[in-house]
Image (cartoon, rainbow, N blue to C red):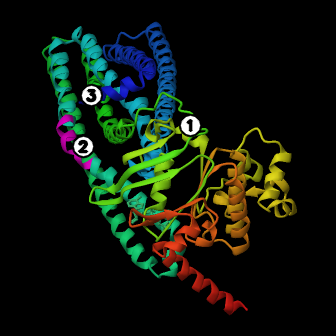
């Protein structure tokens, strides 16, 4: 209960450092006892008036040596603590990171990003004390009283027995407190992550909040949350202080008891003055390690609460990584009776059939919210819990390794992620082996070459998310990276929404060119863009309403026709305005 076995076996490399730490502390204790013994011997000699230069000299020498040894041991113990916490942090962060990689693109289905960050950064830091201080102290706190008992039993057995019996009272109170401390702490952590979540969200959306004058409301909301957090923090602190007081009381009372017994034994003449003095000085040492353990214990509890969160993350099921590296190249994509729900109570896709033959150009259109992007993310392996069948060739997409999917399908959304770094860095992600000439060629293709040249060329530095480029420029650069990736399948999901008409036309031109040699799936709300597609699926509320080429669909005068004529009217209208 006071030791988390799983945590220790997870980082079993740290065992040797913990053992080293205990050994150093134990040697430190031994030298402390030696020092006390020589000092008390000297004192009793002074008192009994049989002092000589020789005895003073040897007492002094023993004291100095003991001090030096203790100093070295203290350094050694803290060095061991440092080494073990380093090991632990590295190991756990690595585990969390590789776990996330294994869960892969679908991780958001299971855990929130902010929780991952908090657990990986703060949570792991909390374990530093657990391994560096608590765990060694746990063993040392058992070893030290036993050692002192043995030493003291030579002087006075009753004293030694009484003191040894009192020591376990401290862990007993710790365990009693732990029962409700554990609940309190897990509540504390819950509120801590909740506060972190809303802080991050509100910070990222600050401009929006200001525009809608909701910042005040959100501010109040956060103040409320912060107040709750403050209260629970105070509760935790109170609990810790109270339990420390209780432990202190036990320690002092125990030591006092030992001292009283030794003094009365001295008075009755059954122990010497030296023995009595030594017991007085060593009584407290019986309790100090346990008392120290108690104060580390609260920090360690924090660490254990954090470790629960870490293990929750590590225990998330991961779809077993498919073994067969299915070859996606040169295969048709077929969707049969596909159903999907994000939440149990609402089905988004109601058993649809779609087909994307190799090297064909297929479009998906439909009202906002009808499920287009959902199809795209199922194809990308981001949503794995679908019903029905989604195959590439004859292999289920859920049986294809994520790596393989990512290599073969390139997804371009409406806000593609550009990373902080140079233009070159961002482009090379698409194809690490590309030469500068190739990079320039593709930049020319997306008509970004002139702009990039007028900046610092391929070394132009981008901010996070490419925030120092315009929306159109970002999208062109993302497209350039996608073209470099040179995968057999491309999915464009509103890749040209919220950018200027000129960029839109340029990008569409490239999409159409790409469609001649690749399998292209184009999701677009602008029907003019999908006119050239070999096949168009019209989605309505999670069902396929109709499909066919543009001409066929217009002739049918159905759902597509209605959308088309509405858009035509709108475009003619705005066209007239412009003229
Ligand atoms: N992560 C999610 N969790 C729960 N529901 C979701 C999630 N993402 C989408 N939905 C719901 O699924 C439905 C389909 O969403 P989807 O993003 O596929 O629509 P879309 O056709 O791409 O729309 P748009 O044209 O606006 O991009 C929507 O009604 C939406 O409310
Ligand atoms: Mg969408």
Q: Is residue 543 visible?
A: yes
x, y percentage for residue 342?
A: 35, 56
Q: Could you tell me how far apart the alpha carbons at marks 1 and 3 are, in whole angstroms?
A: 61 Å
x, y percentage for residue 440?
A: 83, 52
Quadrant hosting residue 328: top right
Whether the residues at callouts 2 and 1 have beta carbons within 8 Å, the answer is: no
* Marking on residue 404: 1
State which image quarter holds ligand 1: bottom left
Depth check, front residue: 104 or 74 = 104
Q: Nearer the viewer, mark 2 or mark 1?
A: 1
**Marks 2 and 3, the one that precedes in the sequence:** 2
Q: Magenta includes 162?
A: no
Mark 2 falls on what kind of element? helix
Q: Could you tell me how far apart the alpha carbons at marks 2 and 1 are, in whole angstroms?
A: 44 Å
| Quadrant location, the C terminus | bottom right
Q: Residue at x 42, y 53 (%)?
A: 353
Q: Would you name the residue on which mark 2 appears?
A: 182
| Quadrant location, the N terminus | top left
Ligand 1 within 8 Å of disc 3? The answer is: no
How dense is the environment of label 2, judged by Cα within 10 Å: few (below 14), some, or many (20 and up)?
A: some
x, y percentage for residue 466?
A: 68, 60
Q: Is residue 456 left or right of residue 235?
A: right
Q: Residue at x 31, y 32 (%)?
A: 293
Depth check, front residue: 239 or 579 = 579
Q: Residue at x 73, y 72 (%)?
A: 502
Mark 3 falls on what kind of element? helix
Q: Would you name the residue on which mark 3 appears?
A: 287
Q: Which residues are magenta?
A: 175-185
How dense is the environment of label 3, judged by Cα within 10 Å: few (below 14), some, or many (20 and up)?
A: many
* Marking on residue 228: none
Depth check, front residue: 235 or 360 = 360
Q: Nearer the viewer, mark 1 or mark 3?
A: 1
């Amino acid at each position: 209960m006071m030791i988390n076995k799983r945590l220790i076996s997870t980082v079993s490399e740290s065992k040797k450092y913990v053992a080293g730490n205990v050994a150093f502390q134990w040697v430190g204790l031994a030298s402390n006892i030696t020092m006390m013994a020589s000092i008390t011997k000297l004192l009793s000699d002074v008192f009994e008036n049989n002092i000589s230069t020789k005895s003073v000299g040897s007492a002094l020498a023993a004291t100095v040596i003991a001090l030096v040894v203790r100093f070295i041991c203290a350094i050694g113990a803290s060095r061991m603590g440092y080494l073990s916490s380093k090991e632990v942090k590295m190991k756990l962060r690595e585990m969390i990171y590789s776990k996330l990689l294994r869960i892969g693109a679908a991780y958001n289905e299971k855990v929130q990003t902010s929780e991952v960050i908090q657990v990986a950064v703060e949570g792991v830091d909390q374990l530093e004390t657990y391994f560096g201080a608590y765990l060694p102290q746990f063993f040392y706190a058992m070893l030290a009283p036993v050692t002192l008992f043995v030493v003291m039993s030579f002087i006075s057995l009753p004293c030694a027995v009484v003191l040894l019996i009192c020591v376990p009272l401290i862990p007993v109170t710790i365990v009693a407190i732990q029962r409700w401390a554990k609940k309190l702490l897990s509540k504390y952590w819950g509120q801590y992550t909740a506060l972190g979540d809303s802080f991050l969200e509100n910070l990222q959306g600050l401009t929006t909040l200001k525009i809608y004058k909701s910042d005040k409301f959100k501010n109040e909301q956060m103040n409320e949350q912060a107040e709750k957090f403050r209260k629970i923090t105070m509760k935790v602190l109170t609990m810790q202080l109270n339990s420390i007081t209780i432990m202190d009381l036990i320690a002092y009372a125990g030591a006092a008891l030992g001292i009283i017994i030794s003094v009365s034994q001295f008075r009755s003449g059954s122990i010497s003055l030296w023995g009595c003095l030594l017991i007085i000085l060593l009584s407290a040492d019986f309790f100090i390690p346990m008392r120290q353990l108690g104060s580390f214990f609260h920090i360690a509890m924090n660490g254990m609460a954090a470790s629960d969160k870490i293990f929750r993350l590590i225990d998330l099921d991961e779809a077993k990584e498919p073994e067969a590296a299915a070859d996606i190249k040169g295969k048709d994509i077929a969707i049969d009776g596909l159903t999907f729900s994000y939440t149990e109570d609402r089905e988004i896709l109601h058993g649809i059939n779609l087909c994307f033959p190799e090297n064909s150009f297929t479009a998906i259109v439909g009202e906002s919210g009808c499920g287009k992007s959902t199809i795209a993310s199922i194809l990308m392996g981001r949503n794995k819990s679908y019903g029905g069948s989604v195959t590439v060739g004859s292999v289920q997409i859920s049986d294809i390794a994520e790596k393989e999917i990512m290599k073969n399908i390139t997804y371009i959304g409406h806000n593609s992620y550009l990373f902080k770094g140079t233009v070159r860095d961002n482009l090379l992600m698409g194809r690490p082996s590309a030469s500068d000439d190739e990079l320039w060629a593709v930049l020319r293709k997306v008509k970004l070459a002139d702009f990039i040249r007028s900046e610092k060329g391929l070394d132009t530095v981008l901010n996070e998310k490419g925030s120092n480029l315009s929306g159109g420029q970002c999208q062109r650069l993302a497209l350039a990276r996608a073209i470099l990736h040179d995968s057999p399948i491309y999915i464009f999901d509103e890749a040209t929404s919220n950018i200027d008409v000129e960029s839109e036309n340029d990008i569409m031109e490239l999409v159409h060119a790409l469609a001649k040699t690749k399998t292209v799936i184009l999701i677009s709300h602008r029907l003019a863009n999908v006119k050239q597609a070999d096949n168009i699926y019209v989605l309505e509320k999670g069902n396929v309403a109709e499909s066919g080429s543009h001409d066929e669909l217009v002739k049918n005068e159905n759902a597509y026709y209605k959308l088309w004529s509405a858009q035509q009217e709108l475009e003619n209208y705005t066209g007239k305005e412009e003229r």
